[in-house]
């Protein structure tokens, strides 16, 4: 099996992160243009903001929390040259849950659905780490 296949889920996550960066940027610009927030808000990110700006910002922050463990695991698997079919499946499962989480947060933001999708993605990632550590140790 081609070990570089594990990079495709990582690229998909980077695309999601770039999308959220652009969305966050546009939401901030719109809020400033509409005078919903003052430009000075960006000095320390303090003050009142419209919900869509807060949600967009939080969604961007989310891309640098749990996914960090995903990227590190992919890097570690590549370093140890231990890419398996299961790794690729689990990586894609995690990515799908992250895309769903992002979609829910940026659309309805229905917390029970968002929490469920987050938890499922987290469980996939934890299981993947346990499997990797079991196989490597």
Image: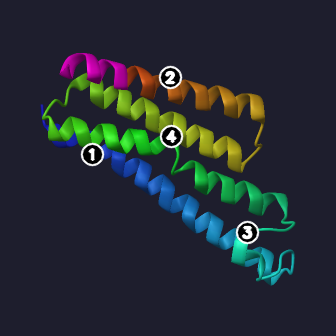
Q: Main secondary structure of the magenta part?
A: helix
Residue at horizontal 53%, vertical 50%? 63
Q: Quadrant of the N terminus?
A: top left
The residue that disc 4 covers is: 66
Please tell me whether residue 132 belongs to the stretch shown in magenta.
Answer: yes
Dot 3: within a 10 Å radius of its alpha carbon, few (fewer than 14), some, or many (20 or more) residues? few
Dot 1: within a 10 Å radius of its alpha carbon, few (fewer than 14), some, or many (20 or more) residues? some
Q: x%, y% of residue 91?
A: 36, 33
The residue that disc 3 covers is: 45
- State the CA–CA distance, disc 4 to disc 2: 11 Å
- State the CA–CA distance, disc 1 to disc 2: 21 Å
Label 1 or label 2, whichever comes before in sequence order: 1
- In what element is the residue under mark 2? helix
The residue that disc 2 covers is: 123
Q: x%, y% of residue 115?
A: 68, 30
- State the CA–CA distance, disc 1 to disc 3: 34 Å
Residue at horizontal 36%, vertical 44%? 71
Residues under numbered marks 1 and 2 in contact, where contact means CB atoms less than 8 Å apart: no
Mark number, residue 7? 1
- In what element is the residue under mark 1? helix
Left or right: 6 in relation to 1: right
> Which range is magenta?
129-137
Left or right: 81 in relation to 46: left
- State which quadrant residue 119 falls in: top right
């Amino acid at each position: 099996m081609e070990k570089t296949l594990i990079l495709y889920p990582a690229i998909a996550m980077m695309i999601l992160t770039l999308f959220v960066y652009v969305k966050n940027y546009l939401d901030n610009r719109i809020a400033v243009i509409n005078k919903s927030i003052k430009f000075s808000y960006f000095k320390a990110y303090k003050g009142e903001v419209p919900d869509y700006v807060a949600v967009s910002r939080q969604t961007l922050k989310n891309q640098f929390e749990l996914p960090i463990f995903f990227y590190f695991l992919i890097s570690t698997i590549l370093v140890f040259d231990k890419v398996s079919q299961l790794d690729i499946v689990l990586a894609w499962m995690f990515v799908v849950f992250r895309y769903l989480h992002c979609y829910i947060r940026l659309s309805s933001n229905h917390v029970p659905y968002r929490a469920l999708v987050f938890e499922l993605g987290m469980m996939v990632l934890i299981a993947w780490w346990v499997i990797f550590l079991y196989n490597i140790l």
